[in-house]
Image (cartoon, helix red, strand yellow):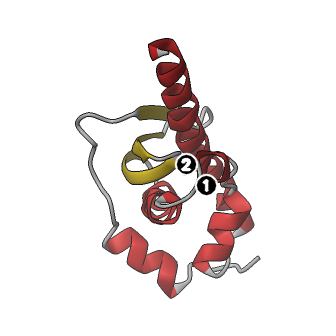
Amino acid sequence: MVQFYTEKFLSHFREPSNVGEIKKADGIGQASACDCGDVVRVTISIDGGRVSDSRFKASGCATAIAGGSLATEMVKGMTLEDAADLSADVLAEGFGGMPEQKIRCLDTVCNAVRLAIERSQSTTQSRD
Ligand code: FES
């Protein structure tokens, strides 16, 4: 782990990708970090068993914003299983390292992604 924010992290924080919300999303997930109250909301679209689009909104710290940006980029094209397994460590590696104490903020982002996928699957099953 690094003790500073990498350039890649800072660029995702300053100019985050995929900010917003998909209007007719297949899955919506919202997670909060209970100790700080920050909230991350992720919406996804699904096509052929893969994530075809993903957006996020974060009311939170720089890591929640940068993490939402990288996570929504990474999950596009992934199978639902792989996207649901996205971990804070993978996001941290994607940034080229993260200060250890901020990893828990990335957990919040991953929880929101996982919830969006779980809810999409329960919606799909209830339509069957
Ligand atoms: S300090 Fe709350 S998500 Fe980072």
Residue 78: quadrant of the picture: bottom right
Would you say 75 lies left or right of 81 here?
left
Identity of the amino acid at label 1? Answer: Leu
In this view, 65 is above or below 44:
below
Element under label 2? Answer: helix
User: How far, Cα to Cα, is label 1 from label 2?
Assistant: 5 Å
Q: Is residue 46 above or below residue 79?
A: above
Q: Say which residue appears at 76% left-offset and 76% top-offset.
A: 1
Q: Residues within 10 Å of mark 1 (few under 14, many from 20)?
A: many
Disc 2 C-beta below 8 A from ligand 1: no
Q: Which quadrant holds residue 113? A: top right
Q: Is residue 66 left or right of residue 25?
A: right
In the image, 20 versus 39, the foreground residue is 20
Residue placed at 55% from the left, 21% from the top? 122
| Residue at the limit of the structure toward the left, as seen here | 23
Query: Is there CB contact under 8 Å for labels 1 and 2?
Result: yes
Q: Is residue 103 left or right of residue 60?
A: right
Q: Which residue is mark 2?
A: 109
Q: Nearer the viewer, residue 91 or 34?
A: 91
Q: Which residue is mark 1?
A: 106
Neighbour class for label 2 at 10 Å: few (<14), some, many (≥20)?
A: many
Residues 128 and 70: in front is 128
Circle on res. 27: none
Q: Amino acid at mark 2?
A: Val
Where is residue 106? Give x, y as percent.
61, 54
